[in-house]
Each structure stands twice: as C-alpha cells, then as structure tokens.
Amino acid sequence: MLRKLMKHELRATGRVMGPLLLLVLVAAVGGNLSTYRLLETGNGVLNTLGVLLLMGYTIAFVASGVMAFVLMVQRFYKNLLRDEGYLTMTLPVSVHEHIWAKLLTSLIWWIAVLAVAAVSMLILVFSRNMMQEISDILAHLHIGDLNLSQNLPHIVLFCVELAMLLAVGGACVCLHFYAALAVGHSFTHHKDALSVAGFFAMPVAWHFIQRIAMFLLNLVGLEGVRLWLQSLQPATQTHLTMLGVTVVTAIPAALYYALTAYFLKNRLNLG
C-alpha cells in the first residue's frame, strides 16, 4: 500500500515539480547562451536579453527549491490535517504508511532538485575552452601520485556517509514540520498558531535534552574515548565523525517521527 500512496504523491507533486525542473534546465541553456554569446556582442538589445535570460535562470533555480519545500508542507497539511483528512484517514492504510509516503516523496524531490541544480550549473558554465582546460589538467595530472588504490575505498565510503547524512538531515527537517503540524492540529482552536509555536518549541526542548545528556556523559567520563579516537588514523576518525553526526541527527528525527505518528493516530482533531 505504501507503493500506491507514493505513486499517488509523486503524480500529484510531479505536475508541479516536473515542469519546473525542466524549466531550470532550459533556463540554464539560455543562461549559457547569454554568458558566452549575447553578453559579448556589445549590442544593447542583446545584452539586455542576456541579462533577462540569466535572471530567468536564477528565478527558476530558486523557485525549484522553494516549491519542493512548499509542497512538502502543503501535501501533509492539506491531505492529512484539513478536510481531505476525513477521507484520507478512512483508507485502509496505517498512519506510518501515510507518513512514510509523504516523507519519501519529499526526499525524492529534494534529491531531484539537487541533481538538476548540479546539472544546470554545469550547463551554465559549459564551454569548449573549459573542456580543453579540464583535458589539459588531466593530461598533466600524475594519477599514480594520488594513491587512488589506497584512497578510493575511503572516498567511496565518505560519499556514502555524506549521502546518509544528507538523507537523515532532510528527513529530520521534514519530520520537524510534520510533528509541529500534527501537535498543533490536536487542539480544537488556534491550530495553525499552535503549530507554529510547536515548531519553535521543539528545537528548544531538544537542545535542553542534549545539554542534560552531555552533562551526564561528562560525569561518566569520556577521556578514554577521546584518547582512543586520537589514536586512530585520520581517515578512520573522519568516518567515525560522519557516522556520529548522522546518529545525532537521527535521534531528533526519530523523536519527531514518534510525535507525528502518535498525534495523527490518537489526538488528531479535524473538527
């Protein structure tokens, strides 16, 4: 059932995000034409057109990220907490599946936005001279001096860890909004205002929990752990740091998820 929910979510959001992401790529082509053609002609009309094309790319680029964020909040808000919630909550689907469908769809579009942003930037700066410069750099680069056979596993592992951290961080951001909205809409009156208040109160509460946890850990003593970490190789320290940051980021994400699921299942007030 989760697959069907995600299919529905992707269709609903794809009507907006698909054309918008395509527009970013088309605008990047126009921006490239402006940079290497129109702005170098010296003609006032063509220069103005070039500036407008670059502005169009910038607007489309920013709009894609903003719209992905807006849809993340809007789909959860309208589909589960407003009038549509009366129908949505009667479906033979668990609350967890609803949350995961919204969460995974949001992450997919954020990944798509990042991918399109990277491709559009390459299109924007692409030129024959740039390709020739890259070719010359690679030709003079001594690959053997880089010890790729030794460093490649660490590079690949670091990329995987970075992807995990970004995914967990993105999920934490989504779940933060979901939890605030779910808590706010458990009340009878002033739901939106209480959702906003909850949004700002939750990080404060989490910071307070962190301070208590650090205080208790300092009482136990972490000197042995610090000495052990210092004895490790720099690459190993980097990997452990990445994993540690990911775990620390995952903890509030799990708490936000638990709050969202609990309030949607037990305290949701659609009246």
Image (cartoon, grey):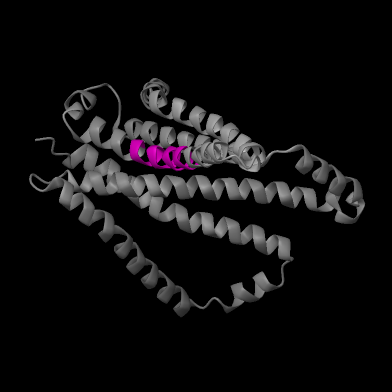
Q: Magenta segment, which residues?
A: 58-71
Where does residue 85 sit, x and y in percent of width and height?
20, 29
Q: Is residue 50 magenta?
A: no
| Image: 224 above or below 175 | below
Picture residue at 40% right of the left edge, 38% below the top: 68
In front of the other: 91 or 17: 17
Residue 155 is left or right of residue 51, and the answer is: right
Quarter of the figure that contains the N terminus: top left
- Residue at x 79%, y 53% (from the top left corner): 151
Q: Position of residue 60 (x, y in %)?
A: 46, 37
Quadrant showing the C terminus: top left
Q: Quadrant of residue 182?
A: top left
Queried whether the magenta region covers residue 60, the answer comes back as yes
Could you tell me residue 39's position as x and y percent? 61, 42
Give the dominant element type of the magenta stretch: helix, strand or loop: helix
Residue at (29, 58) in percent of width and height: 202
Q: Is residue 135 left or right of residue 28?
A: right
